[in-house]
Amino acid sequence: MDGMKLISMMCYRLYSDISGADDEQTFLNFQCYPDKATLDFIVIVVKHLEISLEYFLEGVGMHFVDFTIEKGYGEMLHTLGRTFHAFLDNLDYLHAFPGIVMPSFACTEDDEDPDVLFVDYYSRREGLEALAIGALRGCAKNFYNLSVRFEVMWTKAEKINETEVVNHVRFKVTQVGQIDSPTLDLVTMERAKSAMTVALPASLAPAAVNFVSTNEFSEIHPYHFIFDKSLTVQQYGFGISVLCPEVTSFPAVDQLLELVWPYTTFNYENVERFKNLVFQFAVTKGTAKTRGTAGSVDYLGDYTNW
């Protein structure tokens, strides 16, 4: 269940109390509704309760986290990272579902203050940053016993392709300190931590490594491509040639592919920012069956491999 669905459920339950509408016949809990219907509910609810939109959305975000814990997902969510920063780095793995309008998050540390994080929030929906703040505040409290303070640094619209624009908000998140009583019990928290403390050897590579040739690498990874910081393709596997037979040179990546996930402008800065994610692309030159290809990003010195 996504945040907008939960808002729909909460808003209509409040709306039905206000208006006397028939809950069962007028609004079904397990049906997806247009965003406009949900936003119309929100306007009615906040007006009736005489509260601000931001206050309401942040409260819904915090309740969303409580709801997921109540339904048994708390321990799973906590395993996304041992720290709040690690949790934010891995959060998008929960959102990588084609066809669902989900937000994206990227997190970086402040070079001068270890208690400060910068969180970039990307959404195709405008004006829901307060919902994201509430959800992240709830995660910090429930999973990491942590009090956090949010500051919206800026908001801007970014064009991610010829037709779509994403809403990009940067938060400054200050980790204030520990909370006395976490929501998850200590046994659950320690079990979640122990699942992530697996001792690994310093290197998984054998002592003597025989590097494969370009042709051998292409046979192992036929759909790979390597690009530099200017996003110019330097090498690609024979599978790309099959998908895009008209490509005979080394073009820019955006001439071959359109970024589907994460929702952000495709440039090298954002590739580095979302390096923990599985990137999803649609092939713009090729057959229809090549739509929706996905893969991970690896760094090779000054080059990047997908």
Image (cartoon, rainbow, N blue to C red):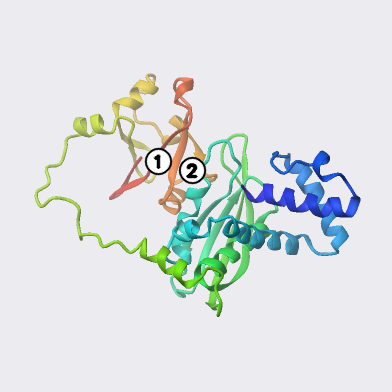
At 79% from the left edge and 49% from the top edge, which residue is drawn? 12
Which label belongs to residue 4? none
The answer, for residue 216, to whether it is visible in the render is yes
Can the viewer see residue 42 in this picture? no
Where is residue 303? Give x, y as percent.
31, 45
290 left or right of 180? Answer: left
Residue tagged 2: 266
- Asked if disc 2 and disc 1 are in contact, CB closer than 8 Å, the reply is yes
> Mark 2: which secondary structure?
loop
Q: Is residue 234 above or below residue 140?
A: above
Residue located beneath label 1 in the image: 231
Residue 142 placed where, x, y %? 55, 67
Give residue 257's quadrant in the image.
top left
- Report helix, strand or loop for mark 1: loop
Residue that appears at 77% across and 48% down: 39
Residue at figure coordinates x 53%, y 54% from the top left: 105
Q: Name which residue type carries label 1.
A: Leu
**Label 2 crowd (10 A; few <14 / some 14-19 / many >=20):** some
How far across and down, in percent of the image, does residue 27 sit? 79, 42
Depicted 267 relative to depicted 286: above or below: below
Question: Disc 2 to disc 1, how far (Cα)?
Answer: 9 Å
Amino acid at pointer 2: Phe
> On screen, 266 above or below 153?
above
Frontmost residue, 242 versus 83 = 83
